[in-house]
Image (cartoon, helix red, strand yellow):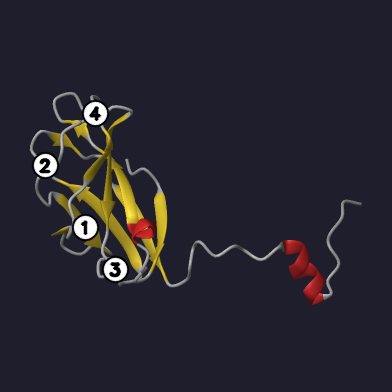
């Protein structure tokens, strides 16, 4: 089961906005958190269902004491250059990566605030709906 759908702007320049989080568990019981540093590019990326490729960066443990098993992966601007769905997963000896992460690469800035609906109604001249 994937953990949710995160949106990242296509070719995002800010590294913090390109960071995804993934929970890793020990493969013996698939419950106990994996709390050891990853020493190689073991996470795989698949854009729009294409053949998976190793991530450019390593996944790093967020906090092995307070948040054991939670890892972050900073994607590169190149890895988020194509609009679509990016699946982050991995096949790692001793690690269960069943959760994975799904990222939607979008052409707009998902951090840009939505317009205030009251202003939108006022700008169109439409009257807001009220309950009869």
Residue under label 3: 77
Q: What residue is shown at x 78% (from left), y 68% (from top)?
A: 121
Q: Which mark is residue 45?
A: 1
Q: Nearer the viewer, mark 3 or mark 2?
A: 3
Task: State whether residue 41 is above or below residue 2.
Answer: below
- The span from disc 3 to disc 1 (Cα, nearest Å) is 13 Å
Q: Nearer the viewer, mark 1 or mark 4?
A: 4
Badge 3 or badge 1: first in the primary sequence: 1
Instruction: Find out whether the residues at labels 3 and 2 contact each other: C-beta distance under 8 Å.
Output: no
Q: Secondary structure at mark 1?
A: strand
Q: Nearer the viewer, mark 3 or mark 4?
A: 3
In the rendered image, residue 68, in percent from the top left (x then y), is placed at 27, 30
Task: State whether residue 27 is above or below residue 91.
Answer: above
Residue under label 4: 33
In the rendered image, residue 105, in percent from the top left (x then y), is placed at 37, 65
The crowding category of the residue bearing disc 4, from other C-alpha atoms within 10 Å (few below 14, some 14 to 19, many at least 20), is: some
Residue under label 2: 92
- The span from disc 3 to disc 4 (Cα, nearest Å) is 29 Å
């Amino acid at each position: 089961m994937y953990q949710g759908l995160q949106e990242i702007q296509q070719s995002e320049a800010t590294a913090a906005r390109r960071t995804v989080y993934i929970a890793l568990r020990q493969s013996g019981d698939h419950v106990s958190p994996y709390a050891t540093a990853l020493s190689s590019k073991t996470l795989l990326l698949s854009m729009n269902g294409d053949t998976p490729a190793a991530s450019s960066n390593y996944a790093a443990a967020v906090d092995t004491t307070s948040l054991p098993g939670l890892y972050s992966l900073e994607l590169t601007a190149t890895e988020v250059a194509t609009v679509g769905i990016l699946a982050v997963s991995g096949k790692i000896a001793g690690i269960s990566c069943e959760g994975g992460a799904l990222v939607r690469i979008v052409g707009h800035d998902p951090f840009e605030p939505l317009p205030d609906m009251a202003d939108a109604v006022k700008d169109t001249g439409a009257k807001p709906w009220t309950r009869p």
